[in-house]
Amino acid sequence: MMRDKRLREVLDDDQYRKFLRIKDADEYLILTKDPELKDGNNGSELYMLKKRVLISALLATLGVFGQAQASVVYNSWTSNDAATGNYILTVTDVGSTFNWNLTVNPWNAEALALFVDLGTAVIGTPASVVLTNVNPVGQISVFATDTASDNCGTGCNLNGLALPVLVGGDWELVFRLGDVGYDGIQTFSWTTSDFGLTESAFGLVGIRAQQLCDAGSTLPSSTCGGSDKSYGTPGDGGGGGSNEIPEPGSLALVGLGLLGAAALKRRKA
C-alpha cells in the first residue's frame, strides 16, 4: 500500500491507471493460471524470469526507458528562382520540446530566415518563445510570432514568392538566422518548447536566403552571390514527411521477449 501511495504522488492519472493494470507480477501470473504455479512453485527460475519480464513491461509502460520521438522533415522546395537551396529542415518532437535543425547540403545557399506555419496555433509574443541549445551561439532569434507579414527584418522578406494559403492566415513562428550578408554558416540548430503541439501541426515553411550559388557551385565559392526565397511542406515531391522513432521502452520489451522465449526453449529442452 505504501508503494502504491508513493507512486500515486509522482505519476499522472494515465500513468497510474496503467500501473494498476499490471501492478503486481505475482498476481498477474496467478490470474493467468501459469502452469509454473500449479505446485506453488513461485520461486523457480522460470517463474522469476517471467516476473522480471512483467516488471520490465511495467517500467516501459510508465515511460521509464525513455520518451517516444517523432520528426518532420522538409527537403523538397519550390523557389522564386530557377534554382533553389539544398535545404534540409528537420524538427524532432522530444517530450515537451521541438529540436530544430536547418542545414544546406550540398552547401549551395545560406539561410537568413525561417517562416513556420503551425496551423491555427497561437504562440504568444516573440519574447515568450525561449530558445535553448542555440548553435551557432547568438545567431538565431525569434523575429515574429502569429504574423501575416512576410517580413523578416532589414533586407529580409518573402516578397515575390507565390505562397500557398497559410492555415489560419499567418505564420506562427519567424526565426531570424545570422546577419545580412555572408556569414559562413551552413547549419543552424536550436530547441524550443513544443507549444502543446505535435509534429502533425507542421505545415508550410518558408526560407529566405541571401546567398545562392550558380548550378554546380557550392559555398564559399565567389560565384554564390544570388538570393533565394523558397517554400516547402512535409512530403513535397515525396522528399519530406513525418517519421516515427521507436520508443526505447518498446525496443527493450522486444529484447526481453526474445530473451524470455530463448529461456523457455532451453527449459523445455
Image (tube, rainbow, N blue to C red):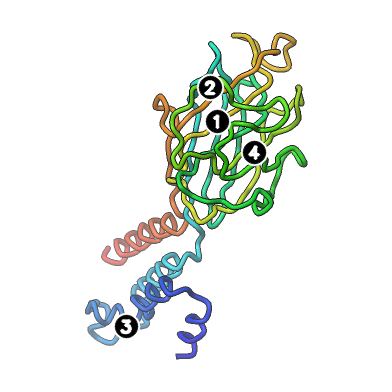
- Disc 3 and disc 1 in contact, CB within 8 angstroms: no
In-image side of 129 versus 77 (left or right):
right
The residue depicted at 57 percent of the width and 41 percent of the height is: 147
Cα distance in 3D space between marks 2 and 4 = 18 Å
Amino acid carrying label 3: it is Glu
Cα distance in 3D space between marks 3 and 1 = 56 Å
Cα distance in 3D space between marks 4 and 1 = 10 Å
Amino acid carrying label 1: it is Gly
Mark 4 vs mark 3: give the one in front.
Answer: 4
Mark 2, residue position: 161
- Sequence order check, earlier mark of 3 and 1: 3
Find residue 21 and report its image quarter: bottom left
- Disc 2 and disc 1 in contact, CB within 8 angstroms: yes
- Sequence order check, earlier mark of 4 and 3: 3
Amino acid carrying label 2: it is Leu
Mark 1, residue position: 206
In-image side of 195 versus 156 (left or right):
left
Mark 3, residue position: 27
Above/below status of 223 relative to 91: above
Mark 2 vs mark 3: give the one in front.
Answer: 2
Question: Callout 1: few (<14), some (14-19), or many (20+) C-alpha neighbours within 10 Å?
Answer: many
Amino acid carrying label 4: it is Phe
Find residue 217 and report its image quarter: top right
Q: Position of residue 116 (x, y in %)?
A: 54, 38
Mark 4, residue position: 175
Mark 2 vs mark 4: give the one in front.
Answer: 2
